[in-house]
Amino acid sequence: MVKIPGADFQSIDLLDLDAIAIKHDWLKDITDIFFAAYQKYKTAAELSKYNVGILRNIVEVVENAAWSELSKKR
């Protein structure tokens, strides 16, 4: 794996909300998401279902973690 100063890479199953939520403490400080995940499927419906699901899951969990952290600081 490439090492980038200041970057912390994590391996997470982005189709599994529970697997993402377990990383809550790590996710709360995220400022940027670079989405490059992609799963190939036979039909357009499956392609959309899973790839949009991956993006939706990570954005929702990061958003919830960030709001949770902000509410603690108020």
Image: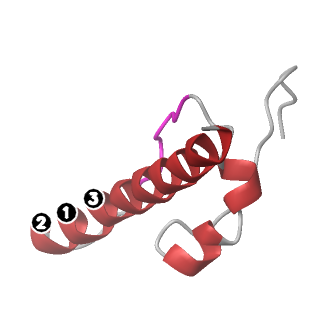
Q: Are marks 3 and 1 in contact (CB under 8 Å)?
A: yes
Count how many numbered circles sit on residues in the image: 3
> Is 36 one of the magenta-colored residues?
yes
Q: Which residue is mark 2?
A: 44
Amino acid at the residue labelled 2: Ala
| Residue in the picture at 65% in, 64% down | 12
Residues under numbered marks 2 and 1 in contact, where contact means CB atoms less than 8 Å apart: yes
Residue 51 position, x and y percent, is 32, 60
Residue found farthest to the front: 74
Establish if 60 lies above or below 36: below
Residue type indicated by callout 1: Ser
Instruction: Please report the bounds of the magenta region as a residue range.
Output: 32-38
- Alpha carbon of mark 3 to alpha carbon of mark 1: how far? 6 Å
Q: Classify 10 Å Cα crowding around label 1: few (below 14), some (14-19), many (20 and above).
A: some
Is residue 36 in view? yes
Q: Is 72 left or right of 6, judged from the image as shown?
A: left
Residue 39 seen anywhere in this rendered image of the structure: no
Pointer 1 residue: 48
Q: Which mark is residue 52?
A: 3
Q: CA distance from mark 2 to mark 1?
A: 6 Å
Q: Earlier in the sequence, mark 3 or mark 2?
A: 2
